[in-house]
Image (cartoon, rainbow, N blue to C red):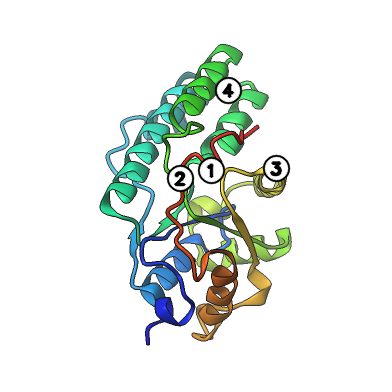
Amino acid sequence: MNAREKYGIPNDAVITIAGTVGVGKSTMTKTLANALNFKTSFEKVDNNPYLESFYEDFQRWSFHLQVYFLAERFKEQKKIFEYGGGFVQDRSIYEDTGIFAKMHYEKGTMTPTDYETYKNLFDAMVMTPYFPHPDLLIYIEGSLDEVLKRIHERGREMEKSTPISYWEEMHDRYSKWIDSFNACPVLRINIADYDLFNDEESVDLILEKVSRVIGGRSVKQSVSTFADNRIE
């Protein structure tokens, strides 16, 4: 019996992984997909026509970059559901508007007009009865100290040279965002409760929790179930 059958997780489920940098979203995505025999969906950054320009001038290119990410994530989400589900997805479409676009607006690197246009576009595309929301969003969380430790251990120079104040802000923004998130069911997992690198059985603890939310039932409800919810 495979893990999907053991825990009664539908073979057409779509699970999205969210959380700030350093919490292990990619590792969680790969491990869960492998255990459930699901496909993976990762954020595509190659061939992004705005990324380099964005880092040179946040104010000039933040709106363009966020619209590009929104379009790409929307297409990916649509593809996943057209395929019939059975996916674990790294990063959600909701984080862009709830965290990154909002941060640019509040810091003055996105104009109020551009921010309002972006939010209206997001709502028209995503917060409708026609958009297929994930069956479950797994939010990975941990203390700021633990997150900073993991960022340092994986040794990416760009991340190591980033001021700690940035990571503090992102940690705070993610915490506030998830507390008000209601577009689909949420399972919060603390990074102190498992070790996917050194303990293979840790995935079973996570799958047990996943099963309590979406196990043993058909997850393909009407996509309008959460359509009236809004992301601030």
* For marks 4 and 1 on the same chain, the one whose residue lies earlier in the sequence: 4
- Mark sitting earlier along the chain (2/4): 4
Residue at 39% across, 69% down: 33
- The tag on residue 52 is none
Q: Are marks 4 and 3 in contact (CB under 8 Å)?
A: no
Residue under numbered circle 4: 109
Residue 45 visible? The answer is: no
Q: Which residue is mark 2?
A: 222
Front position among marks 2 and 3:
2
* Residue kind at label 3, given as amino acid type: Ser
Q: Secondary structure at mark 4?
A: loop
Q: Residue at x 44, y 61 (%)?
A: 218
Q: Which residue is mark 3?
A: 180
Left or right side of 167 for 208: left
Q: Amino acid at mark 2?
A: Ser
Q: Percent x, y for residue 82?
A: 28, 47
The Cα atoms of the two marked residues, 2 and 4, are separated by 38 Å
* Residue 95 drawn above or below residue 219: above
Q: Which residue is mark 1?
A: 225
CA distance separating discs 2 and 3: 23 Å
For badge 4, the amino acid type reads: Thr
Q: Mark 1, mark 3: which one is toward the viewer?
A: 1
Real-space Cα separation, disc 1 to disc 3, in angstroms: 17 Å
